[in-house]
Image: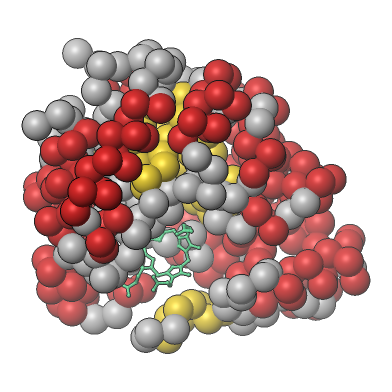
Amino acid sequence: MTKTILRALAGETLPTPPIWMMRQAGRYLPEYKATRAQAGDFLSLCYNPELAAEVTLQPIRRYGFDAAILFADILLLPQALGADLWFVTGEGPRLSTITSESDFAALKPVHAIDDTLAPVYETIKILRRELPEETTLIGFAGAPWTVATYMIAGQGTPDQGPAHALMQGNRLLFEQLLGKITEGTIEYLSRQIEAGAEVVKIFDSWAGSLKGEDFVKYAQEPARIITEALKRRHPGIPVIAFPRQAGDGYIGFHAKTGADCVAVDDSVTPEWAAEHVQIDGCVQGNLASAHMVTGGDALVSETRRVVQAFSKGPHIFNLGHGITPDADPENVQLMIDTVRGA
Ligand code: CP3
């Protein structure tokens, strides 16, 4: 029997939605922290295929999620393109910045990415051997705009100010950078599919800071280009697009990009998303991740609400964004039991 996630992605309405969780391998799990300590730092974990496969499998063993997501990071691609990358404990990622033509010219050619990313493909191969047969393996990459915001600023920013400044100040350079990341993403995701990823997801975490025409040009259009190229090379591999906080930009995103599924965050209600987004195809989402911290009756009632709101069409249950390190693992079990009607 076909895997439940693939059935939902093919447009089937299932009596119980399949479920997985963004950042399901992460610091809220004691077993993740133990393996991470064994690896040393976060990047060493990402580039160690045995250990990266191990942390990917941990939430599958503990909870039996319907999908596993490759353990890696969206910032490995900029690193493979030649940016310096490191993580400051308690603060987040740091990268060398791209703000001038000479910074851009110093990046490596797209075909060089495999030199750095080969261990990621190895992780995928291990996972395809070790995952239970009913579990779908999802590969992923950052969307060009979100990746560019980190490459331009050299770190996470509250408002993506430096990337907006480059867009306004040197649009040609900005668009060249976006174009290069788009090409790199197509190659990276193709390689993940060739290694065994059964679905790919494009994370545009900062899509919400693009408005109007900028959203169309720099969030929607790159998602369409990537999806179209992947569909040509790998027909039948579903694509999940996640233009986080897109608001009205979510409307029509399936048709405008060719994505099989649009993931929605919790800045929109599930009822709104059912009416305006799910009418066009499968949706993924969108329980607020704060419930994984607070639990209780609110978790149960909001989980039921999400299931109910999306029950008339294809749906993959997920959070609206990644689970946070302060979440209680028991709340995750409560969410799963509620979704599965136990
Ligand atoms: O979802 C998963 O479990 C798969 C693995 C995954 C990670 N990052 C592991 C990770 C995925 C899909 C990502 C995507 C990612 N990475 C995004 C897009 C999705 C989103 O959440 O919006 C972004 C913006 C990044 C960049 C990034 N990586 C930041 C800003 C940080 C620091 C913030 C933090 O939580 O510390 C990371 C680090 C990171 N990526 C961790 C994990 C498990 C925490 C690292 C650690 O163990 O200390």
Q: Is residue 45 visible to us here?
A: no
Q: Is residue 31 left or right of residue 6?
A: left
Foreground pick, 205 / 313: 313
Q: In the image, is residue 198 above or below residue 4?
A: below
Name the image quarter holding residue 106. Answer: bottom right
Q: Please give the name of the residue rendered at 57% of the width and 66% of the height, measured from the top-left corner.
A: 78
Residue 66 lies in quadrant: top left
The reply, left or right, for residue 24 in relation to residue 213 is: left
Vertical order, 94 against 172 (above or below): below
Where is residue 204 drawn, in percent x and y? 58, 51
Where, quadrant-wise, is the N terminus in this rendering? top left
Quarter of the render that holds ligand 1:
bottom left
Q: Is residue 65 above or below residue 116?
A: above
Residue 57: x and y in percent read 17, 50
Q: Residue at x 35, y 55 (%)?
A: 289
Total marks drawn?
0
Residue 156: where, in percent of width, then height? 57, 74
Front residue of this view, candidates 103 and 221 = 221
Toward the viewer: 261 or 57? 261
The structure residue drawn at horizontal position 9% and vertical position 32%, both measured from the top left corner, is 342
| Color theme of the render | secondary structure
Question: Which of the two residues, 82 or 161, is positioned nearer the viewer here?
Answer: 161
Residue 12 in view (yes/no): yes
Residue at 14% x, 38% y is 337
